[in-house]
Image (cartoon, grey):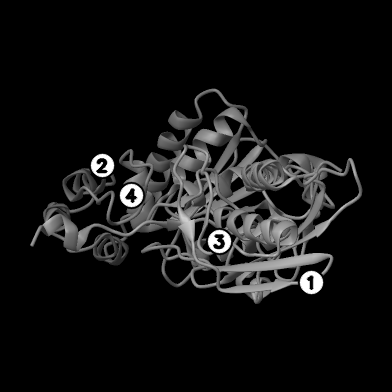
Amino acid sequence: MNAKATTELRRGWTTGACATAAAKAAYQALLTGAFPDPVEIVLPKGERPAFALAREELAEDAALAAIVKDAGDDPDVTHGALVIARVRLAPAGSGVVFRAGEGVGTVTREGLPIPPGEPAINPVPRQMISAAIAEIAEAFGGSGDVEVEISIPGGEALAQKTMNPRLGIVGGLSILGTTGIVRPFSCAAWIASIHRGVDVARAAGITHVIGATGATSETAAQARHPELPEMALMDMGDFAGGLLKYLRAHPVPRLTLAGGFAKLVKLAQGALDLHSARSQVDFEALAEVLRGAGARPELVEAARTANTAKEVLDRAERDGVDVAGAVARAAHASVRKVLRDAPVDLEVLVVDRAGRIVAEVPFESAPPASEDAGCAC
């Protein structure tokens, strides 16, 4: 058997692709009395996948079709969710009007690609749905004036596992996708969410944001800066480069970057993707950091063969060597190199597994008076 065939990860379909297929099937049934099953759609790059219907309902003035979201081998929170489109005829000249049904969120803040008050159906899915409606209208003599309501039962609970609450998207999930395809373990969706978080913060006048590598470091940074609102928290995770490169082009005056010791060692060594599968601690380089911090030769040599960065930190702390401080300063220099000359004042916090801040590089300047409220409102 071909080894590649046994290990290749299976791709899936975005909520936007599923919503498009469901809306197309529902509109065709509304015009013809029959649901196409499977229903084929055209993705932005020209691919033509077909989707089986999981549910269909036809009434005199509306039709409903539903598709089970298949995210392939991606760990997507919406995998297996039911994506429903209910299509109703609308007055002449209306075009395609989008509505948020059960489990689909509504935008409440500026800075997202959809304005406040609108359903959280992103621009590309809107374009895909509108194109599918136009295709059916041309084929079966419809006007193309319809109301499309998208629902995802259980979506409000699922949305709590996403960045939607921080982005000000209330009531459920977003209908997402730029290609229609979910590529397993892709970084793109997470990085796009980081970018949208920066956009929302800037639009709200936030002058200070926090980027943290995980929940423990984020909690420590929040405790340091309790005045900051939730929308100031960027869910950076391992994607330091995704946040820093975007801030370089879309600056916020102050950035607190917080992370665990091992993650910040990798950042200090120049890695911008901090996931263990994509970057590793260079223990030879870490040993040299220890040497520069005045560690005993025995500790320096032990660091070269250490199993984990935590082991190095623990030994250094027992010896009274401030290796965390040296890493914080090196990480600060690495971040400044990525930010270049962007007007972003920077604070770096190194946080241990117990949530203690064990080292820091403070901001260069005092906070603006408006930061007491978290924004320049």
Q: CA distance from mark 1 to mark 3?
A: 50 Å
- Tell me: 149 left or right of 136: right
Q: CA distance from mark 2 to mark 1?
A: 76 Å
Residue 212 picture location, percent across and down: 52, 55
The amino acid pointed to by label 1 is Ala
Label 4 SS: helix
- Tell me: 164 left or right of 369: left
Residue on which disc 4 sits: 265
In the rendered structure, which disc, 3 or 2, sits on the residue that comes first in sequence? 3
Q: Nearer the viewer, mark 4 or mark 1?
A: 1
Residue drawn at the location 79% of the way across and 65% of the way down? 62
In the rendered structure, which disc, 4 or 1, sits on the residue that comes first in sequence? 1
Residue 171 picture location, percent across and down: 75, 67
Q: What label does residue 59 carry, if any?
A: 1
Label 3 SS: helix
Q: What label does residue 51 carry, if any?
A: none
Q: Nearer the viewer, residue 326 or 271?
A: 271
Q: CA distance from mark 3 to mark 2?
A: 29 Å
In the rendered structure, which disc, 2 or 4, sits on the residue that comes first in sequence? 4
Q: CA distance from mark 4 to mark 1?
A: 61 Å
Residue on which disc 2 sits: 292
Residue on which disc 3 sits: 218
Q: CA distance from mark 3 to mark 4?
A: 17 Å
CB within 8 Å, label 3 to label 4: no
The amino acid pointed to by label 4 is Val
Label 1 SS: loop
In the rendered structure, which disc, 3 or 4, sits on the residue that comes first in sequence? 3
The amino acid pointed to by label 3 is Glu
Q: Callout 3 environment at 10 Å: few (<14), some (14 to 19), or many (20+)?
A: many
Q: Callout 4 environment at 10 Å: few (<14), some (14 to 19), or many (20+)?
A: many
